[in-house]
Image (spheres, helix red, strand yellow):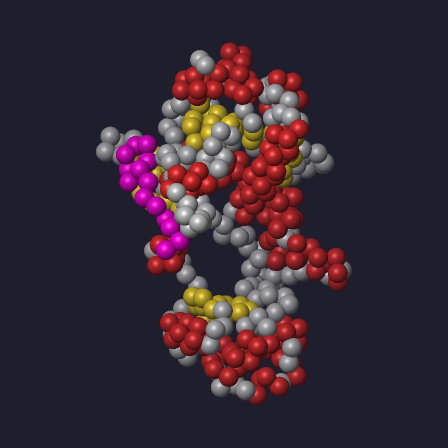
Amino acid sequence: MTISDAAREAKRTMLVGLKVIEFGQIAAAPFAGSLLADLGADVVKVERPGVGDGMRHWPPVSKGESGEEYSENFASVNRNKRSVCADLKDPSDIARIKSLCEQADVLIENYRPGVLPRLGLGPEDIGVINPRLVYCSISGYGQVGPYSTKGAFDVTVQAMSGLMSVTGEENEAPVKSGVPVGDFGAGLYAAYTILASVMHSRQTGEGAYLDCSMLGSMIGMSALQTSEYFGTGIAPKALGSAHPRNAPYQGFAAKDGYFAVAAGNDKLWAGLCKLLHLPELIADPRFASQFQRAANQKVLADILGAIFIKEPVDYWMSVIDEHGIPCAPVNDFPTILNSEQIKELGLVEPIKLPNGCETRTTTFPVRIDGQVPKIRRSSPKLGEHTEEVLKDWVGG
């Protein structure tokens, strides 16, 4: 079956026609909005005049020929969107925003709980004028409960959720994930649930109110750790790069760097023993099964580590790959972003910022019929589309 270019493009922009209002600050809501925008939704970002989303001022900041500065952090989660400025303390601006909400399919916000309702833009307020709207609130700890009004940033939710207790080395100071998984995990859950709710809304005409918390998202992503606790009554602990139920399944030091190996079943373990000329370990009762290897993984890591340190990373990647055992170098971002694999997947593209600077950005990471969704527009200047959006959505 031959698929035309137009059909392929339609699949990559499946959300064309979906109208989204985003009251997004920093990361969680803007990331959710960007996932919808990448697939074709018309995402309108509402920002404060003169200030905008706080991430607009985050470094790295690139300066155009005119001297105008623009944040590349902001650009990374706000591409394919349009920006509208509104003073949410001005009744006339509130009225204009409500007119947009009346036309919208989705509203995403991550203000502190209670802020938008006080301004007349809460779910009940908007539900009166647009009962089919899917209204999604993203917050640190949810809209109910004793922590609902508690301030939250990614690091504090990582701490609260238990994630930091299993990150880093055993018996060392707690370590947060280097990637803001609280913000981005909540954004992913939000986007997924929004689309499910939009399907329901289109079938029934009924909107929905979604209470998406960073805390809940982190708990959801920690299913293996929470089930370990429920099953044993014992708190999971930090193991560095190791795994609580599998070994060898961790990072090792080589002569010139670090790599990870995952001999994650008995067959792979036997293959690793043979290539390392350690056949006696296969029958060793300490390592005879996956669970025994996990129980004795510190001893096992010492044995393997003494061998791995003797040769460089490239050597180990070559010989371990040859035997079909999963392994990988511990890359930094420049190395992986400039790799042939990323190039083949089409995960990095050039982009021009609104100030004229040429840079690069990562793309939507899922290929659809062999192609990634295109970046249709750069991230917006503050308020760039205020009048344009009002004309498009409400006729003036």
Up the image or down, 225 lies above or below 316; here it is above
Horizontal arrangement in the rendering, residue 208 relative to residue 31 (left or right): right
Comparing 9 with 377, the one in front is 9
Comparing 233 with 203, the one in front is 203
Q: Is residue 184 visible?
A: yes
Residue at 46% x, 23% y is 48
Query: In the rendered structure, does residue 346 fall within the stretch colored magenta?
Result: yes
Where does the magenta region start and end? Answer: 344-358
Comparing 11 with 305, the one in front is 11
Which residue is farthest left? 65
Which residue is farthest bottom? 280
Horizontal arrangement in the rendering, residue 365 relative to residue 69 (left or right): right
Up the image or down, 233 lies above or below 112; here it is below
Residue at 51% x, 78% y is 272
Q: Is residue 73 visible?
A: no
Residue 301 locus on image (x, y percent): 55, 75
Residue 185 locus on image (x, y percent): 56, 45
Looking at the rendering, in which quadrant would you find the C terminus? top left
Residue 18 locus on image (x, y percent): 51, 30
Residue at 65% x, 77% y is 289
Residue at 28% x, 37% y is 357
Query: In the rendered structure, does residue 54 fall within the stretch colored magenta?
Result: no
Horizontal arrangement in the rendering, residue 240 relative to residue 143 (left or right): left
| Residue 60 location, quadrant | top left
Horizontal arrangement in the rendering, residue 2 relative to residue 128 (left or right): left
Residue 234 locus on image (x, y percent): 73, 61
Up the image or down, 385 lies above or below 284; here it is above
